[in-house]
């Protein structure tokens, strides 16, 4: 028995924020942001709408697209760096409540932008060990609430949103989550951090990033990580339908995609529209391909991410949805 990705869905908040909106509050420009990051717009959650609200909406759609009801789900996992509450309750428990569930194990995973890969690894382990059969995984973020809007080098980069998938069983390895690799190195923890109590809206406690240093590590690590997982599984770039990397910066994605010999049509981009939505970025990008009608059952995807921790990981996933 293998674990398989049965559905994909996302929820995009309704408030669109353009680079021009930042020009009004910061010494920045649409040209600078596009040239250095590729980002044109991002979406922010509304006041009164939190990470679990976005996650529950994406989760409900993923369950429906898998042909299931919420009560069929036997584990909920949420990846987020912007939980509703620090510590407790977990965002996953709040999502479970919003899906109408009162007896379902649920917990959060903190792996920042690598969150979706860590979710896949965890769900695969639970399903293939036979412990759970239907796992809902959700990457959800309301990063706007922990941004320092006076720090032009970080606040223009991020967006809010959620992406979700149902992981269940298949007996066909060509329909499975073929392999997942995750790693991390806490020696680099200070490169990207949200100091404790970051939800109190104090600039010193907001998201902080040493972008330039992260950029250099990102390109090298992402390339090596994908090379390793493809070699281990005897897969070449020609066998892959889509390369769906974490969407942080267009220049990083292009550099990594080229070094891995992926063609333009294979590389999925959504950073221009959504900015960096951290744990939600890969499933949101995957959902865009799905909703455009271009993601077919049996398509092989290579996923790749790096984020705060530092954490990083990659995955080879056949799409097993309809
Ligand atoms: N508008 C205008 N100027 C800006 C700016 C903005 N929004 N943000 C930074 N700048 C300025 C800097 O102050 C600096 O000015 P200075 O030379 O006078 O000091 C200059 O632009 C260059 O800054 P630098 O940080 O070297 O730019 P960069 O090309 O590295 O781009 C990032 C900055 C953040 C876009 C880039 O480093 C990045 O994307 N990093 C990695 C993010 C990432 O991959 N995260 C993955 C894990 S989530």
Image (cartoon, rainbow, N blue to C red):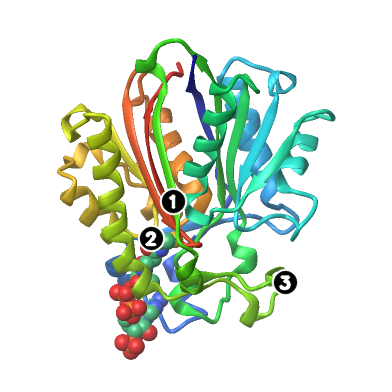
CB of mark 1 near ligand 1 (< 8 Å): no
Mark 2 and mark 3: Cα distance apart in space: 30 Å
Q: CA distance from mark 2 to mark 1?
A: 31 Å
Instruction: Report whether residue 149 is seen.
Output: yes
In front: label 2 or label 1: 1
Q: Is residue 161 above or below residue 67?
A: below
Residue at 45% x, 10% y is 171
Residue 282 location in percent, x, y? 44, 43
Circle 2: is it few (<14), some (14-19), or many (20+) Cα within 10 Å? many
Mark 2 or mark 3, earlier in chain? 2
Task: Left or right? Give the position of 49 relative to 281.
Answer: right
Q: Nearer the viewer, mark 2 or mark 3?
A: 3
Q: Which residue is mark 3?
A: 197
- Report x, y in % for residue 319: 40, 23
Ligand 1 location (quadrant) = bottom left
Residue projecting furthest to the right = 102
Relative to the observer, which residue lies in front, 321 or 43?
Answer: 321
Location of the C terminus by quadrant is: top left
Residue 94 at x, y percent in the picture: 77, 43
Packing grade of label 3 (10 A; few <14, some 14-19, many >=20) is: few
Residue on which the image places disc 1: 183
Please report whichever mark, 2 or 1, sits nearer to the chain's N-terminal start.
Answer: 2
Identify the residue position indicated by label 2 in the image. Answer: 40
Q: Cα distance, mark 3 to mark 1?
A: 26 Å
């Amino acid at each position: 028995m293998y674990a398989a990705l049965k559905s994909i869905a996302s929820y995009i908040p309704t408030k669109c924020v353009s680079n021009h909106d930042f020009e009004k509050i910061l010494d920045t420009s649409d040209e600078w942001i596009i040239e250095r990051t590729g980002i044109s717009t991002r979406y922010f959650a509304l006041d009164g709408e939190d990470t679990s609200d976005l996650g529950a909406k994406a989760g409900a759609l993923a369950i429906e697209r898998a042909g299931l009801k919420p009560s069929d789900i036997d584990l909920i996992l949420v990846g987020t760096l912007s939980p509703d509450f620090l510590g407790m309750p977990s965002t996953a428990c709040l999502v479970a409540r919003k899906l109408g569930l009162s007896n379902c194990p649920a917990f959060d995973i903190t792996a920042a932008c690598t969150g979706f890969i860590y979710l896949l690894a965890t769900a695969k382990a639970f399903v293939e060990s036979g412990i759970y059969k239907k796992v809902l995984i959700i990457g959800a973020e309301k990063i706007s609430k922990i941004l320092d809007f006076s720090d032009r080098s970080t606040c223009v980069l991020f967006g809010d949103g959620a992406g979700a998938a149902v992981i269940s069983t298949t007996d066909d390895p060509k329909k499975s989550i073929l392999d997942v690799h995750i790693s991390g190195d806490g020696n680099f923890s200070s490169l990207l951090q949200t100091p404790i109590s970051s939800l109190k809206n104090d600039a010193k406690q907001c998201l902080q990033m040493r972008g330039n240093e992260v950029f250099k590590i990102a390109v090298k690590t992402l390339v090596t990580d994908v090379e390793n997982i493809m070699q281990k599984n005897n897969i070449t770039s020609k066998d892959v339908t889509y390369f769906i990397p974490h969407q942080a910066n267009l220049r990083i994605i292009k550099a990594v995609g080229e070094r891995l010999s992926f063609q333009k049509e294979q590389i999925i981009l959504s950073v221009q529209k959504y900015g960096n939505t951290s744990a939600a970025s890969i499933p949101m990008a995957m959902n865009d391909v799905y909703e455009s009608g271009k993601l077919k059952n049996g398509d092989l995807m290579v996923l790749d991410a790096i984020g705060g921790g530092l954490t990083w990981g990659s995955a080879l996933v056949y799409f097993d949805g309809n």
